[in-house]
Amino acid sequence: MEPLSWSLSFSGSIKASRGLLVLAIMLRAVLKLCCGITYPHLRSMTGLQRAALAAFGQEITHLQSRGRMALPAWSSLRWTQKTEPAEQKSAALADEDVFYQRQGEAALDEALKIVESEDGWKLEMSEENGDVIYSKALTGNRKVFRLEAELNASPEELHDILFFRVEEMHEWNPSIRRIRVLKHVSRDTVVTHEVSAETAGNLIGQRDFLSVRHSSRSESRVYLGGAATRLESLPPQHGFVRAEDGPTCIILHPLQDRPDRSRFIWLLNMDVKGWLPQSLVNKALPRAQADFTKHLRRRLATQHPENKS
Ligand SMILES: CC(C)CCC[C@@H](C)[C@H]1CC[C@H]2[C@@H]3CC=C4C[C@@H](O)CC[C@]4(C)[C@H]3CC[C@]12C
């Protein structure tokens, strides 16, 4: 091809791609507006209508992720995959481990600060069995949720179920499709890939997460922390909306008079991404948290069938 015509068609394709990008952004804004306007009607919707809306949301988010996959090579939004020369690998690996270890520790510290902050919490729901969920508003109408419950297991048992056996979570929790530990950084730090079930969170479609998870112990307490991270071998997946979990934490401490039972405090701090109105997300999240606790209790009951609670 002639240099001149080549450069013309090249800049033409840049313009076309930019146009598409602008169009996608506009479409997204219009959809968000429509979802926001129609939200009050959702309360009077039938199950079938809700399911249809959920499917619609899912489809839109698929389109969005497809759009991301198709971004042109020059776009700064593209996920870039770096390849390292083989001889640098071993040194780089150690650096990488240090990076994840620090990221896990920082996530736990940051989440503890949020969960232990005293002001701004408002009661979101309170159940007959004593479970309570509080919420706190962050910027942009985003909320974090703090669940407090008493569980029929010691902090060690819960540490085992929630951290060391994290890959088994889908066996007792139908909101989770699968969890894989992609990297063992140390005994107390791992990088995990989590995929929620299609039905989890009701109106929120399926999500995947890539997180660094860290645990620490101090006296009889166990702390679990986590935050969204990156792993070059697992960039966002085709057809999945990658959500971000964290900085998040779970605090487990034994009850004073019953060390075989624990107080469970869980900060849910999730950016579900996608195009749903925040008001809808703020309803689905505490529900997902209550569901998780219900399934965890069932899992514990199979371990101690003699005293279900
Ligand atoms: C609302 C929709 C989008 C998501 C619903 C599923 C949510 C509740 C699921 C998806 C992934 C899950 C997390 C996956 C891994 C861990 C690490 C573990 O040590 C404590 C529980 C924790 C932190 C899970 C909590 C529940 C969780 C956040």
Image (tube, rainbow, N blue to C red):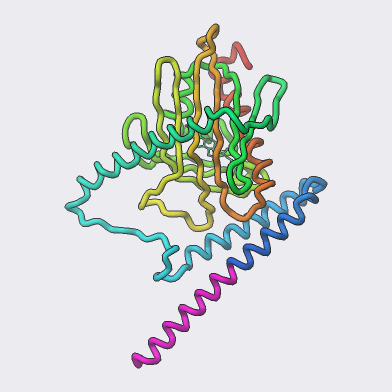
Residue at the right extreme of this rendering: 44
Query: Whole-percent x and y of residue 219?
Result: 40, 15
Is residue 4 shown in magenta?
yes
Q: Quadrant of the image for the C terminus? A: top right
Quadrant hosting residue 119: top right
Spot occupied by residue 23 in the image (x, y as percentages of width and height): 59, 71
Side of 51 where 304 appears, left or right: left
Where 276 falls versus 156 (above or below)? below
x and y percentages locating residue 121 in the rendered image: 63, 31
Q: Residue at x 69, y 20 (%)?
A: 129
> Most prominent secondary structure in the magenta stretch?
helix
**Quarter where residue 136 is shown:** top right
Point out the stretch of residues depicted in magenta: 2-24
- Residue appearing at x 34%, y 90% in the figure: 3
Given residues 221 and 155, the one toward you in this image is 221
Left or right relative to 196: residue 223 = left
Q: Is residue 265 magenta?
A: no
Viewer-side residue, 103 vs 178: 103
Q: Residue furthest top?
A: 257
